[in-house]
Amino acid sequence: MNVELKLNNCRVCDSSLSHSTYIRGEETGNKTEFHKCNSCGSYFSKMEFNQQTENDFYGSSTDVYMNQNYVQNRVGDILSHSFKNGWLLEKDIDFLDIGCGLGWSLVTSKSYGFNAYGIEPMEAAAEYANKNLNVNVTNSLFS
């Protein structure tokens, strides 16, 4: 069940979003809009996403995930932009990556001083992240 949904409001509190910058698209490398929630302050890439079920991940291979350097550079760009613009001034900020894959984004966010957490529906990817990268990933769908 891969129903295409468009992000128009915050996935956390359903408030409106404001455009902040463009980031490299995950699949194409093209510009992708990056938004900040006007209410809770969460950040999102404003792109279509798939609503998936556990059956979509049964027997899947972790080979589908991007490589370490690509993910770490992309997340580093987002975090650097956020610090440069003064959006992340506090200490002990939580970083949640929904669909974190193997967890490389969490490694990067930890290097910036964040409390890093991930949610990943593919059991093998969540297991790899927890055991090999020593990051905190919950094997589950996000709803």
Image: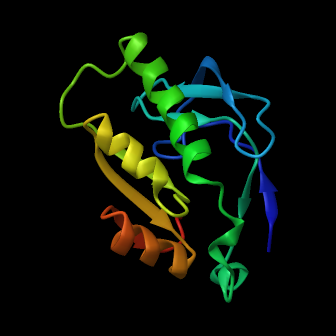
Q: Nearer the viewer, residue 40 or 71?
A: 71
**How far from the left and from the top, in percent, is residue 96?**
40, 49
- Residue at the extreme top: 85
In the image, is 132 to the left or to the right of 99?
left
Residue 128 sits above or below residue 80 on the image: below
Task: Tell which of 134 and 5 is nearer to you.
Answer: 134
Looking at the rendered image, the quarter that the N terminus falls into is bottom right
Outermost residue toward the left? 91
Image location of residue 34, percent across then percent down: 62, 27
Q: Which residue occupies 67% across, 77% down?
A: 53
Q: Position of residue 128 (x, y in %)?
A: 45, 74
Whether residue 53 is situated above or below residue 64 in the rendered picture: below
Task: Describe residue 30's horizontal placement relative to residue 59 as left or right.
Answer: right
**Count of number-bearing discs:** 0
User: Which residue is situated farthest in the bottom direction here?
Assistant: 59
Q: Colour scheme used in the picture?
A: rainbow
**x 81%, y 40%: residue:** 28
Q: Residue 6 in the image: state x and y as whole percent.
A: 75, 44
User: Which of these two is toward me, 58 or 12?
Assistant: 58
